[in-house]
Every structure is written in C-alpha cells, then in structure tokens.
Amino acid sequence: MTDELIASGPVLLELDSDGVARLRLNRPDAANGMNMDLLQALHAAIMRVHGEPGVRAVILSGEGPHFCAGGDVRDFASKGEGLPDYLREATAWLQIAVSSLVQLKPPVIAAVHGFAAGGGGFGLACAADFVVAADSAKFMSGAVRVGMAPDAGTTVTLSRLVGLRRAMDILLTNPTLTAAEALDAGLATKVVPGEVLHDEALALARTLTALPPQALAATKRLLWRGTGASLEAQLPEEARTVSELSGTADAREGLAAVIERRPAHFTGT
Ligand SMILES: CCCCCCCCCCCCC[C@H](O)CC(=O)SCCNC(=O)CCNC(=O)[C@H](O)C(C)(C)COP(=O)(O)OP(=O)(O)OC[C@H]1O[C@@H](n2cnc3c(N)ncnc32)[C@H](O)[C@@H]1OP(=O)(O)O
C-alpha cells in the first residue's frame, strides 16, 4: 500500500493504492481550530477526493492532541467588530465543506481522538457516515458556550442521529460527552482503545473498499435523503435505485458469488 501525499498545509490529503483517502486537519497547535485557510483547504481536499474515481473510503482525522476544537476562538477576538461579517463568509465555507462531505460518494469515517468540539469538530463528526472514537475522546457542541447557535448542520444531523429530545439537551446544555456516552447516544459507531484508533478506522475502511462502490454510494445517498423524506417518497426512490444498480457488473458479480458460494470481487463497474 503506497500513500501519495497530494495536499499539505492546513489539511493533509493522502491517497493510498488500496482506495483509502486520508484527510487530516493540520493545525495541531490550535487544536485544529477552523480558520478560513483550513476551511478552504478542507473544501479543496474534499473536492479532490470527489474527483478521484479510485477512492472507495475516506478517513477524516486531526493532527495533534485533538480531532478539531471548532471555529478558531483566537479569531473571535482578532476580528472584534468585524466578526459578524467575517463569520458570514467563514460559515459559508463551513456550509460548503459539510455539504460536500455528506455528498461524497465514498463513505466517510471520522476517527476521533481528543475533543470534537464546535461547528468544525462536533459538526464534522455528526456529518460523517461512521465515527470511530478513541475511548478517551470527548464530544462537545460548544456553540451556546460562546454565545452562538450550533452550525455545520448539527441541528439536523445530530437530531437525526440521537433524536430531537437528546439533541435539544446536548445543544442547549452543552455537556461534554465521553466516547461511551456518544456511543450510547448514537453519535459514535464504535469506541476503541486510543492506541488502536487509526488501525480500527483503517480496518473499517478496508471492509468498505471490498464492497461494491456504486451500491455503497447509492445506499449512503438514500439514507441521507431518507432521514428527511416520507415513506411514500422514499419507496419509489429506493426501487428506482435498486433497478439501476441491478444492471451493473458488480450486481452480476455479487449474485454469481452468492450462488457459487465464493467471495465476490467488485470492480466498481
Ligand atoms: C466562531 C469562529 C470565529 C472566526 C473563525 C473563522 C472561521 C471559522 C469557521 C466558521 C466557524 C463557524 C462558527 C463555529 O462553528 C462556532 C464554534 O465552533 S463554537 C465552539 C468554538 N470552540 C470552542 O469553544 C472550543 C475551545 N477549546 C476548548 O474548549 C478546549 O481547548 C478543549 C477543546 C476543550 C480542549 O481543552 P484542553 O485539552 O485543555 O486543550 P487546550 O485548551 O489547552 O488547547 C490546546 C491548544 O489549542 C488551542 N485551542 C483550543 N481550542 C481552540 C480553538 N477552537 N481555536 C483556536 N485554538 C484553540 C488552545 O488555545 C491551546 O493553545 P495554547 O494556548 O497551548 O497555545
């Protein structure tokens, strides 16, 4: 497996020859606090992954002691009276980053250690398809604590993950959730010992890369669409997708493998 570093700076992007893309937030001295440079680099890296047909799974993580501590609070003070205008532009970039992450075809695994806080950290974790959390990881919305409201889609994504009642508690009272509490709430997929966090995230990525990419992408799209749709609207969309996928080579390969009782080899076609 060879890693090709194709982006450096506030966001590192590596692609390996096995179809795993690694997106790493890279402002460790600021707990990966999101400033405009990081947000724009994150969007550019996500769009680069979008353009790489060979990518079959994405691992999102943070350099240094934390996954991401949200908006760069040091920028709070430095912007003074200009913060509202600056935030109008900055939050637009955060919206674009979160939206493009959710729309990525390959599944996204957030590998969370340290704190996932604020629109950047908590928001990105809520927008990921899987969250593998180190047992020492902590999750905090952080918005109301700094006199703001949640953003990065968390008033939708968190509510869909944990339910409206628990999302109201988490976003209004701003508890610091342990990894175990995040798992219990439905925010985390699995909790692992910190020392094997990246191994476990990579193992999950490898499981995903062995599955038919078009079927995974369609399932992810249906699930994200379905959480806000009526059953009446979703049933025909599922049926249309199934009939479309049934014409792929991967569908023929999957069916043949089941009948012949052998492992399937999916080509993404
Ligand atoms: C609102 C943003 C202003 C303008 C930014 C422009 C673009 C932003 C993109 C749009 C953002 C939209 C709005 C955003 O979504 C709103 C929010 O995110 S609200 C929540 C903001 N985040 C926080 O309130 C968390 C702040 N951090 C902490 O509470 C703690 O650091 C922690 C995460 C609980 C971890 O605590 P510790 O383990 O004790 O670690 P330290 O506190 O010692 O931190 C280590 C080191 O990192 C620095 N640091 C920590 N968090 C941030 C941060 N969010 N931004 C910048 N730097 C951060 C901290 O100062 C330490 O540095 P040192 O002092 O050692 O040099």
Image (cartoon, grey):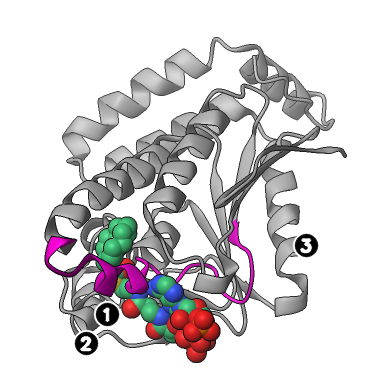
Residue 179 visible in image? no
Q: Indicate the quadrant containing the N terminus: top left, top right, bottom left or bottom right.
A: top right
Q: Quadrant of residue 254?
A: top right
The answer to whether the residues at label 2 and label 3 have Cβ atoms under 8 Å apart is: no
Q: Earlier in the sequence, mark 3 or mark 1?
A: 1
- Quadrant location, ligand no. 1: bottom left
Residue 151 sits in quarter: bottom left
Q: Which mark is residue 170?
A: 1
262 lies above or below 78: above
Q: Secondary structure at mark 2?
A: helix
User: Over which residues does the magenta segment extend?
Assistant: 61-82
Q: Secondary structure at mark 1?
A: helix
Q: Which residue is mark 2?
A: 173
Q: Position of residue 225 (x, y in %)?
A: 29, 38
Q: CA distance from mark 2 to mark 3?
A: 34 Å
Q: Residue at x 55, y 52 (%)?
A: 10
Depth check: 50 or 159 in front?
50
Distance from disc 2 to disc 1, alpha carbons, whole Å, reads: 6 Å
Q: Label 2 is placed on what type of residue?
A: Thr
Q: Residue at x 20, y 54 (%)?
A: 86
Mark 2 vs 1: CB contact within 8 A: yes
Total number of numbered discs in the rendering? 3
Which residue shows up at 55% across the image and 36% down it? 106
Which amino acid type is shown beneath numbered disc 1?
Ile
Q: Nearer the N terminus, badge 2 or badge 3?
A: 2
Q: Which mark is residue 133?
A: none
Q: Is residue 31 positioned above or below 101 on the image?
A: below
